């Protein structure tokens, strides 16, 4: 922990990258694993453009369930710690694979959402109407429709889609320019997000990995692995960094 504190305290451009392990602690259900969504559903039925066109009511009932579950969740202490670190440093961009909005709910700013957001929906036909907020009132008539009459789609990255261009460009740029990347709760198997710490390492940055299990990143030169949950390690790290300044 002492080395992690020194790395963060002396960093001129730290960046955070978070994955499913970050939100799981707050109760967000994951997609894979024993309790994941894909144990009950086929991914192509619920998370693809083809699925939305084939059975939009089924898809939107699932997203209504997900949205309702996320609205009830409270960001854990790890999110609060990131907020404090961001306020303390004045600049701490957060790149996330999560779509649940818990970072923003905790007050964290400058969040780059690589996989989109569960908080808005857009026209499936691409009519150009502005995105609408994903609120429970949206589901009074199923499936939800755009002002043009077309079905809406959630603003998350579906299977077969590219990541949001601007979000990906900025994430790659930060990975190449940062001098420290803090990687929290990622499996390091989902690309291109998994490439970000590799880019940072190749560019001469150090990486602090916080995870309950080791990943392909853990043993690489330049990586400091801290075993534990985000909710336990991040508050300790934030407290030590702020106290040392």
Image (cartoon, grey):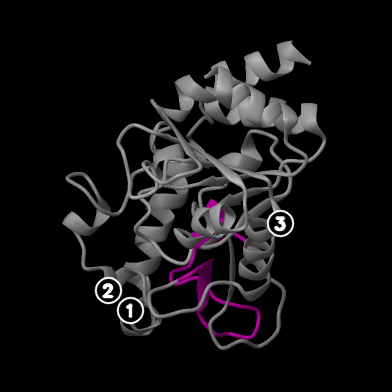
Residue at image point 46% right, 79% down: 161
Membership of 153 in magenta stretch: yes
Q: Earlier in the sequence, mark 3 or mark 2?
A: 2
Q: Position of residue 1 (x, y in %)?
A: 52, 19
Secondary structure under the numbered disc 3 in the rendered image: helix
State which quadrant residue 102 falls in.
top right
Residue at image point 73% right, 36% down: 11
Q: Are marks 1 and 3 in contact (CB under 8 Å)?
A: no
- Mark 3 is surrounded, within 10 Å at the Cα level, by few (under 14), some (14 to 19) or many (20 or more) other residues, namely some
Say the numbered circle drawn on residue 51: 1
Q: Earlier in the sequence, mark 1 or mark 2?
A: 2
Say the numbered circle drawn on residue 177: 3
In the image, is residue 94 above or below residue 61?
A: above
Secondary structure under the numbered disc 1 in the rendered image: helix
Q: Are marks 3 and 2 in contact (CB under 8 Å)?
A: no
Q: Earlier in the sequence, mark 1 or mark 3?
A: 1
70 with respect to 166 (left or right): left
68 with respect to 206 (left or right): left
The answer for how far apart the CA atoms under marks 1 and 3 are is: 39 Å
Q: Are marks 1 and 2 in contact (CB under 8 Å)?
A: yes
The quadrant of the image that shows the C terminus is top right
Q: Position of residue 199 (x, y in %)?
A: 55, 60
Magenta region: 133-157
Say the numbered circle drawn on residue 45: 2
């Amino acid at each position: 922990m002492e080395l992690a504190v020194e790395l963060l305290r002396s960093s001129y451009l730290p960046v955070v990258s978070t994955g499913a392990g970050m939100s799981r602690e707050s109760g967000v259900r994951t997609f894979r694993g024993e309790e994941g969504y894909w144990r009950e559903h086929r991914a192509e039925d619920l998370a693809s453009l083809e699925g939305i066109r084939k059975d939009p009511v089924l898809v939107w009932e699932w997203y209504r369930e997900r949205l309702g579950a996320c609205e009830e969740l409270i960001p854990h202490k790890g999110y609060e710690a990131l907020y404090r670190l961001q306020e303390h440093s004045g600049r701490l961009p957060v790149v996330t694979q999560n779509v649940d909005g818990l970072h923003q709910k905790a007050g964290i700013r400058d969040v780059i959402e690589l996989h989109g957001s569960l908080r808005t929906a857009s026209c499936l036909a691409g009519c150009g109407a502005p995105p609408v907020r994903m609120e429970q009132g949206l589901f009074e008539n199923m499936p939800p429709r755009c002002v043009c009459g077309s079905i809406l789609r959630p603003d998350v990255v579906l299977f077969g889609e590219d990541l949001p261009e601007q979000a990906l460009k900025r994430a790659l740029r930060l990975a190449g320019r940062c001098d420290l990347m803090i990687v929290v709760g990622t499996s390091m198997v989902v690309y291109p997000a998994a490439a970000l710490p590799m880019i940072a390492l190749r560019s001469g940055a150090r990486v602090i990995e916080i995870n309950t299990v080791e990943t392909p990143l853990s043993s690489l030169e330049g990586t400091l692995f801290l075993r534990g949950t985000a909710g336990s390690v991040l508050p300790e790290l934030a407290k030590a960094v702020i106290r040392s300044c």
